[in-house]
Image (cartoon, grey):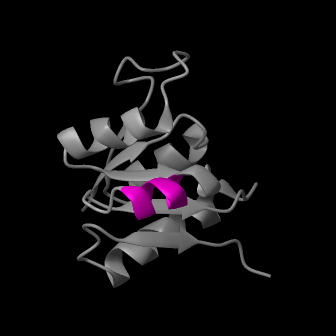
């Protein structure tokens, strides 16, 4: 399905659920970038270099980055949700509904 770079604030249970749904998800830890306090612009640059969609809970900073640097492979900013499977399904459904996410910002909001 989609190539995703999961920012380190995305719960691993969401990552696992996205993988079950068929997505290729690379985590910050798997990329060797965990715990390094890498600035958000460098997170986005890494994702661009690897042609991956950034999925993050860090809404404010990545919305700003999208406005400053609109050339990327997609940014999905998510509301926090303790129902990790539901969050993964909303991300998955957004990817299915919007196959041309390049240079786009998608907001994945918790219902209600």
- Above or below: residue 48 compared with residue 39: below
Q: Position of residue 38 (x, y in %)?
A: 48, 24
Q: Residue at x 60, y 59 (%)?
A: 85
Quadrant (top left/top right/bottom left/bottom right) for the C terminus:
bottom right
Q: Residue at x 23, y 76 (%)?
A: 100
Q: Residue at x 40, y 57 (%)?
A: 68
Residue 65 is covered by the magenta coloring: yes
Q: Residue 108 occupies which quadrant of the picture?
A: bottom right
Start and end of the magenta stretch? 62-68
Quadrant (top left/top right/bottom left/bottom right) for the N terminus:
bottom left
Residue 2 is covered by the magenta coloring: no
- Above or below: residue 38 compared with residue 65: above
Front residue of this view, candidates 40 and 73: 40
Q: Residue 109 occupies which quadrant of the picture?
A: bottom right
Q: Residue furthest right?
A: 112
Total marks placed: 0
Q: Is residue 53 left or right of residue 62?
A: left
Q: Is residue 52 left or right of residue 75?
A: left
**Magenta stretch secondary structure, dominant:** helix
Q: Residue 53 occupies which quadrant of the picture?
A: bottom left
């Amino acid at each position: 399905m989609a190539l995703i770079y999961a920012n380190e604030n995305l719960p691993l249970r969401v990552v696992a659920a996205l993988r079950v749904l068929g997505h290729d998800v690379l985590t910050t830890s798997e990329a060797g970038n965990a715990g390094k306090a890498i600035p958000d612009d460098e997170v986005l640059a890494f994702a661009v270099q690897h042609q991956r969609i950034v999925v993050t809970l860090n809404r404010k900073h990545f919305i700003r980055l999208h406005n400053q640097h609109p050339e990327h492979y997609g940014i999905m900013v998510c509301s926090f949700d303790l129902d990790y499977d539901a969050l993964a399904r909303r991300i998955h459904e957004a990817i299915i509904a919007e196959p041309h996410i390049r240079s786009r910002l998608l907001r994945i909001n918790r219902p209600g």
